[in-house]
Image (cartoon, coloured by chain):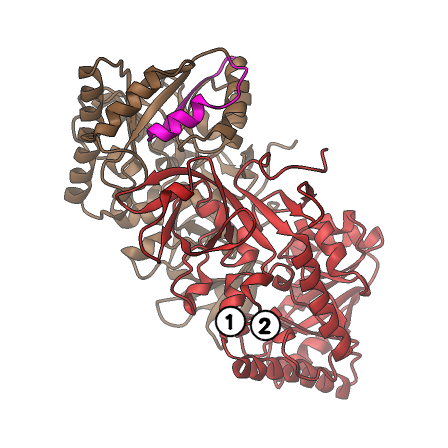
Chain colours: A red, B brown
Amino acid sequence: MRTDYLISDIPTPAVLLDKQRLAANCQRMSDRAARAGVQLRPHLKTAKSAQVAALATAGQFGGITVSTLAEMRYFFDAGYRDLTYAVGIVPPKMAAIEELMEQGARIRIVLDSVAAVESLAARPTRYRGEVPVLIEIDCGGHRAGVSAQSEELLAIAQCIAATSGLTLDGVLTHAGHSYHANSTAARTEIAEAERDAAVLAAQRLRAAGHACRTVSIGSTPTALTDIPLDGVTEIRPGVYVFFDLSQAALGVCELEDIAASVLATVIGHQHESGHLLIDAGALALSKDVSASEFRSDVGYGLVCDLDGKLIPGLHVADAHQEHGFVKSTEGALAFERFPIGSRLRVLPNHACMTVAPYDAYYVLTGDGPSLQRWDKTSGW
Amino acid sequence: MRTDYLISDIPTPAVLLDKQRLAANCQRMSDRAARAGVQLRPHLKTAKSAQVAALATAGQFGGITVSTLAEMRYFFDAGYRDLTYAVGIVPPKMAAIEELMEQGARIRIVLDSVAAVESLAARPTRYRGEVPVLIEIDCGGHRAGVSAQSEELLAIAQCIAATSGLTLDGVLTHAGHSYHANSTAARTEIAEAERDAAVLAAQRLRAAGHACRTVSIGSTPTALTDIPLDGVTEIRPGVYVFFDLSQAALGVCELEDIAASVLATVIGHQHESGHLLIDAGALALSKDVSASEFRSDVGYGLVCDLDGKLIPGLHVADAHQEHGFVKSTEGALAFERFPIGSRLRVLPNHACMTVAPYDAYYVLTGDGPSLQRWDKTSGW
């Protein structure tokens, strides 16, 4: 396998990573965790790459978060042994988890109901070890989890305690609704609610006689507030490694922090309609337009030159399966600047969605023109 | 590799295919092509699978259409030799094409400008054969292509004729704007414009002394009108093999024709918010909500039981990366019908986008409970 590429050699579409930005983003979150006195368990659902994980876990305790069994197996093969599978568990997924636990992994599973505990208790299994369980808490996003104040929280803990093979490890919450908060005040309020929900749940569990070692919170926007995190043991942000236009639109990062971009080739000029066609379309960019909630000029992505410098006004206005439509919001598009065969870079609207289908990253190291190829996983 | 699975064994999320519906959809398009007296060159960008291609090309001449180099290589390896790469060509993609042509493939490339011809003419190449070229015509969708009436059409043809190694093979157009036409009258009008543009372009080229063997048109909605196709040589529809909620919303198919669905597991109950959580989220379903242009009740997909029977009112109302939110539009959701660990099937909003990231299909053959696993390609 070659490990160095020139940007002109890379087949498009492809995802480029700026290693210096990536490292700076990882450092920023590391610093935040250190200041707050909590562990950082990065959520690798965004990057799905062992080399990115190495940067994200540098100086940390080595635990990571995953969202699919494919990520779990991939990161186990890459040497990670302390994993949280942060999506509600169901019995058919336990065999894959137990297989890795028998090989030395420690995998926390997540659930949010007595019914889920009962379904696990009833599963056929030959596994003889203890599976650590986190109870998911709803801190206001209303996606999953039980309320920290609820009776069900204690009922779940009791049910876990009564089930052989399951051990309560703690609580976990995720303030996903912070992705819709575009002011520091609003994010701080959500971050406080996230922390308070997790800490209250842990206190109630302990008061009821349950051990609650892990108090896990985290989303990138809330993790990057400056609130104290007393009572919290770990944070699990994910998208901060790359950032994206959505995070920039929220004010969580600057455009200059975005470490991932899609390399695309100009494949056509449509003078009458006023657009360039590029070979990065809806599959290469995703159809996620989250940033549009707060910015009207972004479309499916903002467009940069090959050096990563934003070209004012240029954005992907529409996306068909393999065709992206690049338009300008600043007067007539200067077609002559973008000849057919020339290349551009598109900043992703929502990095988790954009990079998911690729099987590799091409990495600009900042050290000469050659790029490294980093592998990644995808699918389930 | 196992070739038979039970639906309870299949890890979720996964794409199920109903082989009887798939075969009926393929037959419907075959019949249409036969009635119109044109060849059917199915666009395999939707299915990306050799076994689906075998059904789609059954009884046809064997030519297919692709939209990525990955599809091109995959279908070549599966035995297909007559391929049209129907996305505007740029020189860096020619090496892969020429490599397969040296191994016996005939690959038509597509372009729509003199500049594109000139960039090909200037490419470094060791290939000594002739590359067949289709000129892309804009029939009203304004994505790519030149106008059939334009001077540039003839200029492109002349430039191809003057370039050694390139041979004009014909014209190609795609009425992608038919995806926004939800009446038979509107579709018929677009279909006529599509046909007329391609035929006029061919006539003008021939009148100017150029050979124009191929006159290629096609989108699923226009191909399934009943207009005469005199002067056309082939159609290139794609999504008809599976159909989807978008096509049903347009009136091009019935819900009962949809051959692809995403198998998902119920991973949580949120009584207060009134939703089921499933493990098919934005990556498993895609964030494409095309059908919403004409139906407000679809969201990210309509929900069926394991037998594929629609559950009235149930739809995927929201989608995070690995979480789908299933809600009901028909009163309170009957949570007890969908216990944690139970399975559902989600009809895709836009099948091309939904199935793309998967590496396999699980196929219900209609012949007993066991499913076949069909491979597919993905990425670029």
From this view, report whether residue B221 is shown above or below residue B59. below
Asked if labels 2 and 1 share a chain, the reply is yes
State which region is magenta.
B104-127
Task: Sort mark 2 into few (<14), some (14-19) or many (20+) by Cα contacts within 10 Å.
Answer: many
Cα separation, mark 2 vs mark 1, equals 8 Å
Circle 2/circle 1 CB separation < 8 Å: yes
Query: x, y percentage for residue A99?
Result: 78, 50
SS label for mark 2 = helix
Which of B119/A183 is in front? B119
* Nearer-N-terminus badge (2/1): 2
**Looking at the picture, which amino acid does disc 1 mark?**
Leu
Which chain does the numbered disc 2 sit on?
A
The tally of labels here is 2
Query: x, y percentage for residue B134?
Result: 34, 23
Query: x, y percentage for residue B43?
Result: 39, 31
Which of A168/B132 is in front? B132
Residue furthest to the bottom in view is A207
SS label for mark 1 = helix
Q: Which residue is mark 1?
A: A250
Q: Which residue is mark 2?
A: A221
Which of A42/B155 is in front? B155
User: Split into 4 quadrants, where in the image is the N terminus of chain A?
Assistant: top right
